[in-house]
Amino acid sequence: MRSIYVCHDTIQGIFSALYDAWVYNRHADVGIEFVGKVERQLFCQYIDVVENEKKVLAVERLIQKNLGENTYHDIYYALLADDAKKAEAVFQTMQAARALRNSRKIMEHLSNDSVTKVFELSRRVGNEAHLFQGFVRFRELQGGVLFSEIAPKSQVLTCIADYFYNRYPMENWMIHDKTHGMSLVHPKQKPWFLLTHDQADLQQMGSLIQVEDDYEDLWKTFFQSISIQERENYCCQRTHLPLRYRKEMVEFHERKVDRKNIGS
Amino acid sequence: MNELKTSLCVENKKLNTLVIQEPFTLQEKLHILGAAAKYDVACTSSGVDRRNDGTGMGNAYAAGICHSFSADGRCISLLKILFTNECIYDCKYCANRSSNDVVRTSFTPDEVCTLVMEFYRRNYIEGLFLSSGILKSPDFTMELIYITLHKLRHILNFQGYIHVKTIPGTNGELINRIGFLADRMSVNLELPTAESLKKLAPNKSRKKILEPMRLVQQNRIANKHELALNNRAPAFVPAGQSTQMIIGATPETDYQIMSVAETLYNKFDLKRVFYSAFIPVNEDLALPAVKQGGPPLLREHRLYQADWLLRFYHFQTKELLDEKNPNFNVFLDPKCNWALKHLEYFPVEVNKADYKTLLRVPGIGVRSAQRIVAARRLGILDFQDLKKMGVVLKRALYFLTCKGKMMYATKIEEDYILRNLLQIKESLPDSVTGMAYQQLSLFDVQSNGDKKVS
Ligand code: SF4
């Protein structure tokens, strides 16, 4: 009977599932599915994974030691993607690596479908994370806290954490991922941390977010003045900045009060 | 009495509107001085990696980061503004020339600093691109810019990207001070030849433009030596220099333009030369009339492609163009164009040709050439392998053999290949193909363009 491990769609969840599958079933064809998305089938055995830090660390070490840092990076990124089969692809990649003389070269074996899948997912997540380095917009809340909301397809928060950590060491800031209900929090001059399952009290934040931020209006003014009419090209704009990102980008929000023709 | 009062009142009102210019709000200044800077194209945030030292705000990434895209599809990376649109000069192609009647205003150094810091905090921008018209004199204006940058760097501890335009004629000592605060500096060449410059920018001269370019180049060399001895020494213009030329306002050929670009890369160590398709904002007898079809974007694109060939494909201008054929064929990319004129070099054998030869094959790019060289160490390559490596076979097949064989039996004749190549639809970037929009919007240039502020 095929074993199917059921875990949460988080790094902690999937790493724990990989641990169980590897320890008890490393030669078998196993499934890894996510809580809330399981479609029960006959002749399968469903196993609820106990998720804990110990398993996470063990799998992290296993991959880093045997498959190398670069492969670990690809696997980690792939597991952040929005994809139901990602964990199985990673497990199969680990299995395929065992068969190689040099397991560290596993990511070069693109003739293996699972490896190709991990590779592509990793690239997809990397690209999305890269876009958010530029597309994140902060608003200033009362007390000077910078707050941002994003709606990414992948769980990009930990991919962009170091980037913003280095950029704003002296600010209190927070980025909330609406899609996955997670937040990245950085208290001034301290390391960043991740809050999952909405531990953050966003209700309370919500009221603060309504505060007017004068610089948003200034930014919109600049955004509109900088475009060259003779070269206007909305297709090109949409290729580079797809519509799905714009909801959280203030320069694409309607102005509250229509400004009169400034300066004339 | 009453009548007198009213008429006085009217007089007063007139006076008010005529003489007393209301001070502009920051919002209005940003609108005016942002719009005035939009024609500058050299505004990437690239060329330098710098981590924050943990005490200030900002850092820099060599690859550059786009924060948004404006309605013309261009990346917005920096807060691109003029410090002032006042100007004592009268360059024919410029909306801010002294003879134009436009609304004039200037930022204060503090205003620029506030905008940069607050925009940067909200992750709107990578940094500042500061250009300027000339208020009183080049030195006077650049001194204000120095004050702005000094405050940003040393008082507000801003560690993001700064690009400054140098005004020709600024004194060397001042340029030197600014260079230690900026990441990139640039002087616009404006037009490809000295004659055109004289005609369209009578207050500027080629000599005055090249002077600061040379100075920055020399200071960068000196600074590199210093940094080699002491890596904590302050860096001078670490992201290097760039420049831009206006294309299509004057009669220069592509050959002349590319020769100038080549000289700038080789003799002045420029990081980038930008080409900017001429967009008329003034009516002037010295300028070409507004053309149907909008700015020469396709020509601009061909020049960028050729620029790429100079910088990454080991081509020289004189191989691509000459006195007899001084312009690119707009229907064909410059590399295909070159290959067709030099069929004697082809076909080349993929399994033997050296890296530089591979680079010259249409359909093979830098990445695929590198992959070919790496992969053929492990085995002999055939056309299927090339496809996987990203070679565009429908273009390359006329110029290649694998194991001595061509992909199809094909004639190696200029006309024959040309006809076939022209049938392949070239994937031009969106920035070139949005022509329909441009034709439409051309007619409201006067009402909506720069004149909006007048
Ligand atoms: S110097 Fe020439 S190009 Fe520059 S702002 Fe003045 S008129 Fe315009």
Image: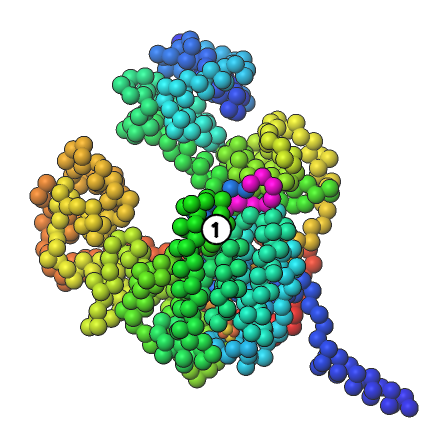
- A249 vs B366, left or right, is right
- A143 vs B350, left or right, is right
Identify the subunit bearing mark 1: B
Q: Residues within 10 Å of mark 1 (few under 14, many from 20)?
A: some
Residue drawn where x is 61% and y is 61% of the image? B147
Residue drawn where x is 22% and y is 65% of the image? B318
Above or below: residue A66 compared with residue B133: above
Indicate yes or no whether the magenta region holds residue B55: yes
* Identity of the residue furthest to the right in this view: B1
Above or below: residue A254 compared with residue A206: below
Main SS category, magenta section: loop
Indicate yes or no whether the magenta region holds residue A254: no
Magenta stretch, residue numbers: B53-62
Residue B285 location (% of width, % of height): 43, 84
Residue A145 location (% of width, % of height): 68, 41
Amino acid beneath label 1: Ala
Does residue A215 appear anywhere in the picture? Answer: yes
Does residue B122 appear anywhere in the picture? Answer: no
Above or below: residue B275 compared with residue B225: below
Residue drawn where x is 37% and y is 31% of the image? A119
Front-most of residues B292 and B146? B146
Above or below: residue B5 compared with residue B97: below
Quadrant for residue B11, please give it: bottom right
Residue B119 location (% of width, % of height): 61, 51
Quadrant for residue A258, please give it: bottom right
User: What is the quadrant of the N terminus of chain A in the image?
Assistant: top left
User: What is the quadrant of the C terminus of chain A in the image?
Assistant: bottom right
Which residue bears the numbered disc 1?
B235
Q: What element carries label 1?
A: loop
